[in-house]
Every structure is written in structure tokens, then in C-alpha cells.
Amino acid sequence: MKSVIFFLGKGGVGKTTSSVSLAYYLAKKDKSVYLASVDPAHNICDIVADKPFKGAKNIFGRLYAEEIDVEQYLKDFVHKTTRQMKETYRYLQIINLDRMLDVMKYSPGMEEYAIMYALEDKIKNNSNKDYIIIDTPPTGLMLKIFALPFTSKMWIEKLVEWRKKIIDLRGAISNINKEAIDKELAIKEEDDKVLKELGIQLETIDFMVNLFQDTDKTKTVIVLNQDMLSVNESKKIIEALKFMKIPLNMILLNKKGMIEDSVDIKNNFKDTTVRDVPFFKSGLPSTEDMINSCKDWVKVLIDE
Ligand SMILES: Nc1ncnc2c1ncn2[C@@H]1O[C@H](COP(=O)(O)OP(=O)(O)OP(=O)(O)O)[C@@H](O)[C@H]1O
Ligand SMILES: [Mg+2]
């Protein structure tokens, strides 16, 4: 895989149109491409197909497109976590785990976790493609997904530290009195199921952190229009990316010319490469229009 390209930006600016355009452009150059949307409100299929489809569908040349089934990932995530917790904590009869886990699906943050795991899974499974293009959900949700591996990493590392201390203490107690520690409880790090699970989680999270910060592999594009709302939202995205040390490669001013007397984009984003795509007066651009619209900006992202 040469790179993963993320299209970010405010609702309605043209993230999906730009992602699809680049995907067609690269497929026409005979590249293998996996184009995915992690937006729970999908719309890639509206552009690339006549009707909705499930799974990865071959669209054109070696281009495969998929609306990732976030709901299914959420169900699988809750199911897997439920099973693991029941297995790991089966000695804790006192807590009503079933009830707690039923509620878990609706807890804040679960959707973000499901999307993060979905992304990891799809990126790993499509690493044989030349390019992976990700059409993202609206800014707020996407920034939370970008932040999740970083915050989770801090938490999990702390949990590993505490867990090791617990096991150490159990070991010390069991040295004094073997009967004092329940047989089900691990007294060595290598026998502890919780520690093992935390290690697996850390591996997933490290994969995402490393990928997001890898300037060779990860490319991000902020799509915006010539209005102050999308400009301001883009500035928030830039701040967040900087904070997470995720590279920003380009600002794509889409629908240029749609509004007269509009905002001076280059002046607002002096530190970033800005490219533009005109407003197609005819409405939904044709595949040919989309492919042509990339010719200028694709060079900023990809060495051909
Ligand atoms: N350059 C353009 N010229 C004319 N119309 C365009 C252009 N780019 C996108 N559009 C139109 O603007 C609308 C929004 O585009 P698109 O769906 O790609 O935005 P989005 O950022 O993905 O939106 P959402 O946040 O809802 O997912 C669509 O009707 C699309 O056809
Ligand atoms: Mg969209």
C-alpha cells in the first residue's frame, strides 16, 4: 500500500465527491484502489452505483468501493467485549454483568470505537491495494475517531501499569499465604487474561497511532467551500490535526466560483497548499468531470 488518503471537512462541502473523483482518477491510471466511507450516513453508492450495495463492490478497473457497515462493527464489538468480560470476570457473580453489557451499546463513545476498529480492519485487509481512500463523517465525529487511538493508548498503558502492580501484590500475598488468593486469579503476569487482552488492544491502537503519524503513508485533505463557516471549521480541523501530529497535505477549495465576492482562501491558509475545483453548474459532475477535476491537485498527494 502506497498511502491512505482521508478527506475531511464540514458537511456538504464535497468530501464524497472529491474521494470518488480521486478513486476514479487513480483507477483510470490502472492503480488498485479501495474507496470506503465510514460515515454512518452513507452516500458513496449514490455516486458510483444505481442502488445501494453491501460489501466491497468492483466499480471500475481495479477500483473497489464499500460503505462500511458501522452498525455491524458496533454489534460485533459489543458482542466480543461481552464475551470476553464474562469469561474474564466469571468469578465476580455479584455484579449483574448481563445488564451492564446490554446498556454498553448505547454508552457514549461506542460508535467512535466501532468506527476506529472498522477502519483498522479495513485498512489491514486492503493493504494489498495501491491506494486506500477514506470518505469521512462530519468533522466532530471524525476528529473524535482520530483522537481515540491517542487517548486510548494513554489509558491502556496506565491500566497495564496498575494491572502489573495488582499481580505483583497477589504474588507477594500468595508467598505468605497460598490459600489467601483464589485459584482463579493469576499471580504471574503471563497467566493473566486481562493483561493479555490489554496487550492485544494496545497492538491495535499502536497500529492506528503509527499509521496516522506516518507522513509517507497517511495523507489528509480538508475540503472546504468559499464560505466563512467551512473556513472556520477547517481551522478547527487543522488545530486538532496539529495537536495529534497528524500531517495535513492539502486544502481543497471545492465549488470555486459558486459564490461571488467570497472569502480569500489562500490568505486564510498561508501555511498549507491550496488547490481548487470549479463549481459545476450542471449539478452532479460526470465521471469524466470528476477525473479531470483531479488532474491539478492529485500531484500534491501522490508521486506518479
Ligand atoms: N464541484 C462541484 N460542483 C457542483 N456541485 C458539487 C461539486 N462538488 C460537490 N457538489 C455537490 O454538492 C453536494 C454535496 O457534495 P458531497 O456529497 O460530495 O459533500 P459531502 O461533504 O460528502 O457531504 P456530507 O457531509 O453530507 O457527506 C452534492 O449534491 C454534490 O453533487
Ligand atoms: Mg459525504
Image: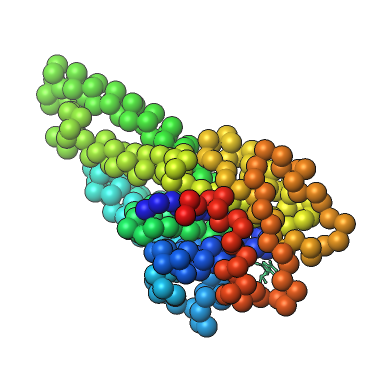
Going by the image, does 75 lie left or right of 195? right
Q: Name above or below for residue 107 compared with residue 288.
A: above
**Colouring method of the image:** rainbow
Farthest right residue in view: 261
| Residue drawn at x 52%, y 75% as measured from the top left | 48
Q: In front: 267, or 174? A: 267
Q: Is residue 149 above or below residue 56?
A: above
Q: Position of residue 241 (x, y in %)?
A: 58, 40
178, 232: nearer the viewer: 232
Q: Quadrant of residue 39?
A: bottom right
x and y percentages locating residue 58 in the rendered image: 40, 74
Judge left or right: residue 43 versus residue 190: right
Of residue 72 and residue 302, the one placed in the foreground of this image is 302
Q: Left or right: where does residue 294 sit relative to residue 70?
A: right
Quadrant location of residue 149? top left
Asked whether the viewer can see residue 175, the reply is yes
Residue 40 visible within the image: no
Ligand 1 shows up in the quarter that is: bottom right
Quadrant in which residue 27 is drawn:
bottom left
Task: Establish if 105 lies above or below 185.
Answer: below
Foreground pick, 189 / 119: 119
**How many numbered marks are there?**
0
- At 21% from the left and 35% from the top, the residue drawn is 192
In the picture, measured across the screen, residue 150 lies left or right of residue 271, that is left
Q: Residue furthest front?
A: 304
- In the image as oriented, which residue stretches furthest toward the bottom? 50
- What residue do we see at 61% from left, 76% from top? 286
User: Which residue is at a point 28% across and 49% down the rendered structure image?
Assistant: 84
